Image: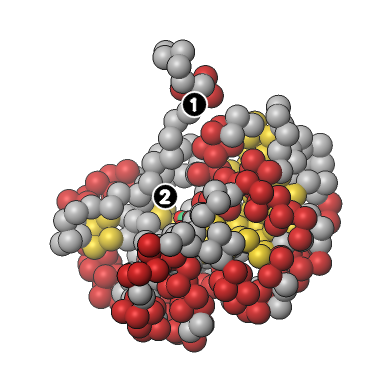
Amino acid sequence: MNPLIRPSVQQLTAYTPGEQPKDSGLIKLNTNENPYPPSPAVARALREFQLETLRLYPDPISRSLRERIAALHDVSPEQVFVGNGSDEVLRLAIRAFTRSGGAIAAFDPTYSLYPVLAAAEDVGYRSVPLPDDFGWADPPADLDASLFCLANPNAPTGVLYPLDTVEDFCARFPGVVLLDEAYVDFAADYDAVPLARERPNVILCRTLSKSFSLAGLRVGYAIGPVDLIGALDKLKDSYNMNALAQALALAALGDIDWMRANARRIVATRERVAAELTRRAYRVVPSAANFLFIQPPDDLTAADLFARLRQRHILVRYFPAPRTQNHLRVSIGTDSDMDAFLAAIQHQ
Ligand SMILES: Cc1ncc(COP(=O)(O)O)c(C=O)c1O
């Protein structure tokens, strides 16, 4: 124990990001990246980006980007926060919406970064167990937490909770509900933006990492009531969004059609692979995201299948926690990536 380090940081187990191998021969289905390239509008903006711009500090409030996001969702720019990936939004929300000695809550299983961020902010973490099918569980009324992080579609399960269920919960929960919609562009018939527009306790968080194919750029955003958004603004780094990220994100958000077309392709591949896995006796959790959460047939453990796929140069994600250890999370790649995956599991 080094007394120079804050005790909560000494005790912290850092988040383990999915592997980013140097070996380009691998089929990478482990971090829910988009297999298709970003919009040509992003490539153009990159080519036209003036090196000279980098001499100056970037716009501290990402004004143009906020305005574009506001126009997309029919809110005012004051209702928009832009962050260095949605992970930054999550971190700031936990800092802003908890008190010292307080706690946040989330389902189990869900995005495994939430408990790490809570521990880093030195606040408690209340887990609400989901049923075996990973469908909705009503959080107890006496849940002692001031912020609920609700990933919808959930990760790593891919389950989409119906809008009316989410809406009911937001109306009942006395604290802030953060709707983490990292995967929402892969879901059908669901729009929670009106909740963030109208409810005083709802913040909705999106990212350009998945559906916009820009995980490397690190851009996420939040929409919500002006006072909650203002709280995030107070806490952010002065220049949290670098100039290049602002320019390229602006270009990406100007070409929504490109994003939608890629999302449609991914959904079609997801449905094809889900049907094939079901036919082969895998348990496939119904997914509204760009990944599948699957349980292998009885004679094979998830950990063994993970290791064997790795040997065949296919990388998927295995979460060894109690609620997830019997499953693998498989990101949806191109059709040929997924054919290679299906061929590799054929021979287990
Ligand atoms: C549920 C969920 N929220 C947020 C994120 C983080 O996204 P970003 O790349 O914008 O930080 C992820 C990434 O895997 C995620 O699964």
Q: Quadrant of the N terminus?
A: top left
Residue sitting at 81 percent across and 67 percent down?
A: 198
Q: Pointer 1: residues within 10 angstroms few (<14), some, or many (20+)?
A: few
Residue 75: mark in rendering: none
- Residue at 71% over, 27% down: 101
The image shows residue 339 at horizontal and vertical percentages of 26, 72
**Residue 70 location, x and y as percent?**
66, 74
Tags 2 and 1 in contact by the CB under 8 Å rule? no
Q: Is mark 2 within 8 Å of ligand 1?
A: no
Mark 1 sits on what residue? 9
Frontmost residue, 254 versus 272: 254
Q: Name the residue rendered at 76%, 68% in the picture.
A: 197
The secondary element bearing badge 2 is classed as loop
Name which residue type carries label 1.
Answer: Val
Quarter occupied by residue 301: top left
Label 2 neighbour load within 10 Å: few <14, some 14-19, many 20+: many
Q: Which residue is mark 2?
A: 327
Residue at position x 32%, y 43% in the image: 303
**In the rendered view, does 238 fall on the left or right side of 264?**
right
Q: Quadrant of the C terminus?
A: bottom left
